[in-house]
Image (spheres, grey):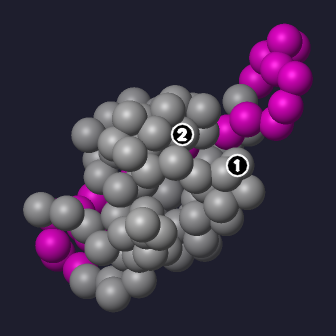
Amino acid sequence: MKKSPEYIRGLIITILYKAHPEKISQKELWFQLDRLGTILSEEVLTSEIVYLRDKGYVTSEKQKGYRLLAEMFLLRLTPKGIDLVENHIEDETVWVRP
């Protein structure tokens, strides 16, 4: 069954909320989504991260390291993202699980 973008964004936000205040890599996020049964292509995951970043819910910074073969980002939830999870604000484009 295909999962909606709103559902996927909610899972991403929830995972980052549980990790907060720590940053997690895009790769770690991808593994956690996979463990939850949400298998995404790299393109779809990147697209959803960009969407959430543009909405102000997450920050992303390029991961430093000379051994990286591909571009990788470290992600963290912003105060606005925390407010979304804690129901201080609403956004119908991101379904956050209670």
Q: Is residue 20 above or below residue 84?
A: above
Residue 86, percent across and down? 16, 64
Extent of the magenta region = 64-89
Q: In this view, does 13 lie above or below 6?
A: above
Q: Is residue 66 visible?
A: yes
Left or right of 70 on screen, residue 20? left
Residue 76, percent across and down? 47, 45
Residue 55, percent across and down? 52, 75
The question of residue 76 being in magenta is answered with yes
Q: Nearer the viewer, residue 70 or 36?
A: 36
Give me the residue at 38% from left, 45% from top.
37
Judged from the image, the secondary structure of the residue bearing numbered disc 1 is helix
Residue furthest toward the bottom?
A: 92
Give me the residue at 76% from left, 24% from top.
64
Q: In this view, does 89 lie above or below 31?
A: below
Give me the residue at 46% from left, 39% from top.
34
Of labels 2 and 1, earlier in sequence is 2
The amino acid type found where label 1 is placed reads Glu
The amino acid type found where label 2 is placed reads Trp
Spatial CA distance of label 2 from label 1 is: 8 Å
Left or right of 56 on screen, residue 66? right
Q: Can residue 20 be seen in this view?
A: no
Residue with the mark numbered 1: 42
The question of residue 8 being in magenta is answered with no
Quadrant location of the N terminus in the rendered image: bottom left
Residue 85, percent across and down? 23, 63
Marks 2 & 1, CB-CB < 8 Å contact: yes
**Residue 95 lies in quadrant:** bottom left
Few, some or many residues within 10 Å of mark 2 (<14, 14–19, 20+): some
Residue with the mark numbered 2: 30
Judged from the image, the secondary structure of the residue bearing numbered disc 2 is helix
Quadrant location of the C terminus in the rendered image: bottom left
